[in-house]
Image: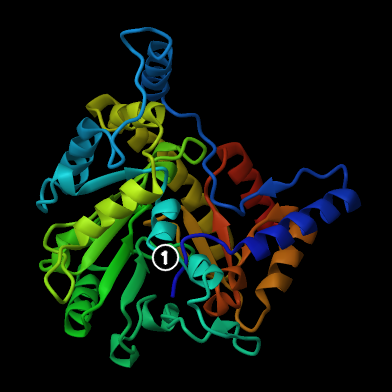
Amino acid sequence: MPQREENRGPLNQISLREFEHTQKYPEEKIIRLGIGDTTEPIPDIITSAMAEYARGLSTVSGYRGYGAEQGNKELRQAIAHRFYRDVGVKGDEIFVSDGAQCDISRLQAYVDTSVIIGQAGKFHDETGKYGGIVYMNCRPENNFFPDLSKMPRTDVIFFCSPNNPTGNAATRLQLKQLVEFAKANGSMIVYDSAYAAYITDGCPKSIFEIPGAKEVAIEVSSFSKFAGFTGIRLGWTAVPKELKYSNGFPVIMDFNRLACTCFNGASSIAQAGGLACLSLQGYMALNSVVGYYMKNAKIIREAFESLGLKVYGGKNAPYIWVHFPGSSSWDVFAEILERAHILTVPGIGFGPGGEEFIRVSAFGHTECILEASRRLKSL
């Protein structure tokens, strides 16, 4: 079962090891290519829209209180038009939120949430897995897509494409198989497309490009990684009216109730920024930033390849997934930190299937990426 972002435990361990490293090497500059946080400034056309909205709140005519829990109607329509106009998802099927991770948690499909509320079953130390969760094995030998013929039925299938941490984007054929599997088993897909803006090779950017997907899938996405809104917090979930329970009741009605009960609406200032992101000028500016990160990814990928390593990702996502056969991912993390003063993320932090791998982020200033490349090539 692929995860959106690192477990908190490994992140805490990384922070501790970083601190210890700085104490040992106070003169060395650490290059942080670990956590996937954006680094480049948000285009002015977007921040200006947020600033203007914020200034308006100090006037009688511009002040606004509570907004709709489902999100600003204009923004919902803009999201539907920008990302779903060719697949028929409408504005009233879009629910604006404070981020994709928050939406997934509210759906209680995220691994950490299931663990917290006791639905994950017993944890097995020998495997690093919870008994109540089915883990989809996505590794190089199966092209980072699970063998569905060996998968048991589950109520919910949680799938991320482009995948974090592997950087792999599912093909049209693979997603067609996933939709057919969900239909055959009466399962619902929670599809995380937070990195869809980074896809460049024609792979689907939305699950709804697959015929029949609207009958089995919810799609969760975010402004965080393509618009630099990691600290601003804005995302959305698309819930098609065609998606229904076995008794014929529309899922969208339950999701609407969930939004109204557990959520009070995304920040109106953030939503003003979201609208600016989806304007013609704003979207063009953001595409340039995405291109900047993907150039970084190419530099990092080539650096690891020059060492004779097998490297994945970095083509449809801002993450590079590097294989060190037979090695502990924590040991590799430690060696790269010790010898090159570069922070990465050990693959085991994403689950047991990540052992022998590290994930490297392309989010960073290009001058830092170039320096990291130089250090890696000198290992």
Residue in the foreground of this view, choosing between 237 and 11: 237
Image vertical order of residue 372 relative to residue 209, above or below: above
- Residue 237 location in percent, x, y? 29, 51
In the rendered structure, the answer to whether residue 184 lies left or right of residue 355 reads left
Q: Residues within 10 Å of mark 1 (few under 14, many from 20)?
A: some
- Left or right: where 282 falls relative to 35: left
Q: Residue placed at 42% from the left, 65% from the top?
A: 108
| Vertical side of 286 occupied by 3: above or below | below
Q: Is residue 202 visible?
A: no
Mark 1 — residue? 108
Give the side of residue 24 with respect to residue 67, left or right: right
Drawn side of residue 142 relative to residue 202, left or right: right
Name the element at disc 1. loop
For image coordinates 9% across by 51% down, the residue present is 88
Q: Which image quadrant: the C terminus?
A: bottom right
Residue 261 at x, y = what percent?
A: 35, 50
Q: Locate residue 16: give its quadrant.
A: bottom right
- In x, y percent, where is residue 310? 52, 72
Q: Is residue 101 visible?
A: yes
Pick whichever, 330 or 306, lies toward us: 330
What is the number of callouts on the image?
1
Q: Residue at x 64, y 84 (%)?
A: 326
Residue 184: x and y in percent read 17, 84
Q: In which quadrant of the rendered image does the N terminus lie?
A: bottom left
Asked whether 230 or 164 is in front, the reply is 230
Quarter residue 74 falls in: top left
Q: Amino acid at mark 1?
A: Gln
Q: Is residue 5 above or below residue 60?
A: below
